[in-house]
Image (cartoon, rainbow, N blue to C red):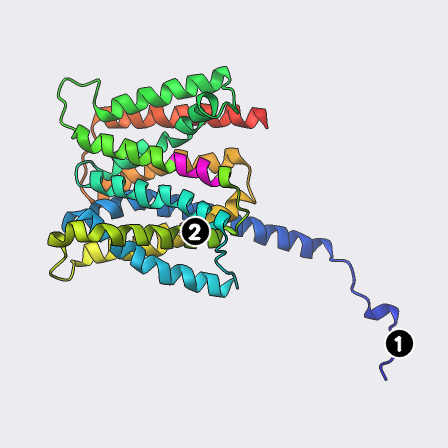
Amino acid sequence: MNSPLNKNDFPKPLSAPVVASIIQSSRLATAGQFISVVLIWSLTPLAAVWTVHELHWAWGLFIRFSLAIPIAMIFMTVFKLKIPLHPQALLSYAAGALGLFLSMSFCYMGASKVSSAMISIIYGIAPLVSGLLSIFLFKNERFSAYQWLGLILGITGLIFALGLSSENLKLDYFGVVLEIIAMLFYVLSAFAVLQVNANIHPISQMTGSTIMSWLGYSLLLPFFWADLPTQFPSLQTTVALIYSALFSSVLAMICYYQLLNKVNPTTLMLITIMTPVLATLWGSWLNHESLGADLIIGLVLLCSGLVLYSLAKRSEV
């Protein structure tokens, strides 16, 4: 028979140093997740450019998602999660696939025609486009004066970055159009997932959308059978594929979804502001991409516009 409890058997309140230690640890974890997402997403455009240097875009994406699925399943096992298969869940995966299948297809098609910095800058205006869709299409938001100013600065920055203000136009505008279409599908995918509102765990959502996108790429391959890789890719392309599968497709998304529950939207917007800057630096350093005056001015204007937009968002909260 167990002896009766005495007052020493009851748990004591956490002391102030212990609470401070827990808070500090949580803040460090959040900061680490934030830095991870910024670094991973800033290198992702470069990984796409390196992939299509040797592989056809369809095969590159098929290989990327073929590698990503088992990695995602490992995380599903670690966190003891399941992939719901009810109709609303399947609809949510299809909505997510807009950003993984259609968006990535257009992104990789354009990656052979434009620089990694340009890809990141175009995706950088996604929050501004998302705001416009909220106003004119979904009619659930109104822009303040600061947000409209931020939008104008962002668009002006894109114009400079594209070289539209220069007399010597050298950019492949078909590639730019492909990347803009990719960005639009990326934005629409986020709206679609929110609209479906299937209440699925983020990791399950990511895994389900990844599998559905992989099925889409599998159906595409017969049309590009002539472009089947006949030899093992170079070290650079192999690194790009593994990086895209492990970091871009899985780890960054898990960290991002964790941040959604921990930080305010304004802080999260900093990712969008910092990513194009770092992507431009990575492209210049690792891929020898030129840094013209138009690109630098455009980048500064874009980041300034995003800052104004995020500050206005914060004042509304």
Residue holding disc 2: 206
Magenta region: 187-193
Quarter of the view holding residue 301: top left
Q: Disc 1 residue type?
A: Pro
**Residues under labels 1 and 2: Cα distance?**
50 Å
Quarter of the view holding residue 299: top left
Compare residues 152 and 71 and report the one nearer the observer: 71
Q: Main secondary structure of the magenta part?
A: helix
Residue 120 vertical position relative to residue 96 in the rendered view, above or below: above
Q: Indicate whether residue 190 is drawn in magenta.
A: yes
Residue visible at 57% across and 54% down?
25
Image spot of residue 60 (x, y percent) = 22, 52
The reply to whether callout 1 and callout 2 are in contact (CB within 8 Å) is: no
Q: Indicate whether residue 250 is drawn in magenta.
A: no
Q: Disc 2 residue type?
A: Met
Residue visible at 56% across and 48% down?
27
Residue 278 vertical position relative to residue 173 in the rendered view, above or below: below
Residue visible at 40% across and 46% down?
94
Image spot of residue 273 (x, y percent) = 40, 33
Compare residues 23 and 164 and report the one nearer the observer: 164
